[in-house]
Image (cartoon, rainbow, N blue to C red):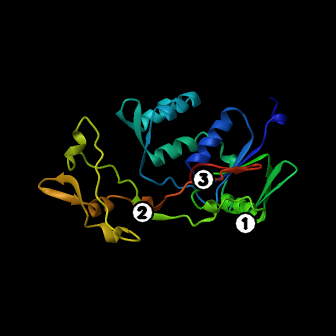
Amino acid sequence: MTTADKPTVLIVGAGLCGLMLGTLLERIDVPYVIFERTSTIKSLGSAISVGCPVLALFQQLGIYEELVSVGFRTGYSQYIVSRPALYDLLLKQIPAHKVLLKKRILTILEEDDRATIQAADNTVYEGDLLVGADGAYSAVRQRLYEKLKVKGLLPKVDDEELPFNCTCLVGQTEPLDIEEFPILKNSFSQFLIVRGIDIPYMMCDETRHLQTSVKVGDKYLTVGDFYDRTPQELVSKVMLEEKVFETWYHGRTVLLGDGW
């Protein structure tokens, strides 16, 4: 396939899914551009488990050793990886000029086997395929569904509100002193759980008192003790939506990750 024969892919959203797709397209020399609505790219989140199928993908991409170097093995061919570290690893695979910031997509159009998008700054981009990898409240999905609804092609279930009944605060502390936290000297990793409470919009101040199972001396630490060891800019609130849409593609548009 020559470069002229390869499709141009427009990827909306520079999260993990958008960056992984960009990395794959980069490896096979397929033209693409990633559009991100924010003005800066922030590596947020806690940790993610990477198992056998995905590890094989990282091997094929030639970045398996880099993944292992930033992760912790927790079982047979499985690693726990910091989401920011995984994000940074994927971002390194994408040439800087292929990630466009401050591009909030307002409209999408399909004509003559081409997909066209217009951003809030009135810039227009055209490609062969449009991928909505822009999260649970995907602008691409909303624009696509609006058009399908007018044509009577949108299933009723896809027109319902996006429900969620769980809100989480995620982040990572600064590196902890192993003398202060002797639990870190163990040769094995631990996954500790703190039972949540029923607060409609859970925030740091409302959960500081929750006791954890981490003990320093004769005192059990609270969640607040870990908040105090976490840079404020690395704490983010996440609503855990509970829905998978039936319609994940139509025409030249495809939804990916949380966008679907």
Q: Secondary structure at mark 2?
A: strand
Residue 134: x and y in percent read 62, 55
**For this rendering, which residue is in front, 214 or 238?**
238
- As drawn, the residue found furthest toward the right would be 112
Mark 3, residue position: 260
Q: Earlier in the sequence, mark 2 or mark 3?
A: 2
Mark 1, residue position: 120
Q: Residue at x 70, y 47 (%)?
A: 97
The crowd level at tag 3 (other Cα within 10 Å; few <14, some 14-19, many 20+) is many
- Identify whether 81 is placed above or below 116: above
- Identify whether 231 is placed above or below 19: below
Q: Earlier in the sequence, mark 1 or mark 3?
A: 1
Foreground label between 1 and 2: 2
Mark 2, residue position: 166
The crowd level at tag 1 (other Cα within 10 Å; few <14, some 14-19, many 20+) is few
Q: Is residue 239 left or right of residue 162?
A: left
**For this rendering, which residue is in front, 106 or 89?**
106
- Identify whether 88 is placed above or below 78: below
Residue 180: x and y in percent read 20, 50
Foreground label between 1 and 3: 3
How many circles with numbers are drawn on the protein?
3
Q: Secondary structure at mark 3?
A: loop
Residue 230: x and y in percent read 36, 58
Q: Earlier in the sequence, mark 1 or mark 2?
A: 1
